[in-house]
Image (spheres, rainbow, N blue to C red):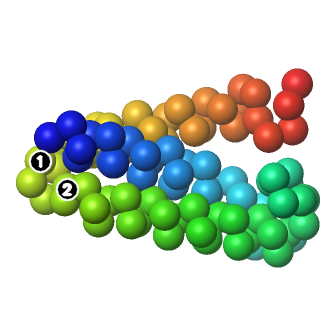
Amino acid sequence: MWQLIILSFLAGLFGGNAFPHFAKGITKEPYPTVFGTSPVINFVAGWLGFLIAALFLFAAHVDLHPRFALFSAFAGVFLAGLFHAWHGSWGK
């Protein structure tokens, strides 16, 4: 059960973090990553983030306890969203 909660949380965290990078990449806007700010790098970073999130969900076996998986994934997305909305990749 704890493995499911942790892996679902990480899936939400990676998926929530991947979204702004993916969105900035496909709209050709600069956005900072550890590898640079170009749109192509952001697209690839977002795509890889979604892929990693899917792998975490696959490893979590969410079909065993879907409610726990859903709520822990929501918590991960919430924290990633708070980071990008408050502190953000640009810093203060």
Q: Amino acid at mark 1?
A: His
Judging by the rendered image, the residue that carries numbered circle 1 is 65
Horizontal side of 62 relative to 16 (left or right) equals left
**Where does the image place residue 45, in percent across and percent down from the top left?**
69, 65
Vertical placement of 92 versus 23: above or below? above
Residues at marks 1 and 2, CA–CA distance in whole angstroms: 6 Å
**Where does the image place residue 22, in percent across and percent down from the top left?**
68, 65
Residue 5 placement: quadrant: top left
Judging by the rendered image, the residue that carries numbered circle 2 is 62
Q: Looking at the image, can residue 29 be seen?
A: no
**Numbered-mark total:** 2
Q: Looking at the image, can residue 9 be seen?
A: yes
Q: Nearer the viewer, residue 47 or 23?
A: 47
Residue 69 placement: quadrant: top left
Q: Quadrant of the C terminus?
A: top right
For label 2, the SS is loop
Horizontal side of 22 relative to 49 (left or right) equals right
Q: Residue at x 40, y 66 (%)?
A: 54
Q: Residue at x 32, y 40 (%)?
A: 6
Q: Residue at x 53, y 32 (%)?
A: 79
Horizontal side of 37 relative to 84 (left or right) equals right
**Neighbourhood count class around disc 2 (C-alpha, 10 Å): few under 14, some 14–19, many 20 upward:** some
**Where does the image place residue 30, in percent across and percent down from the top left?**
90, 59
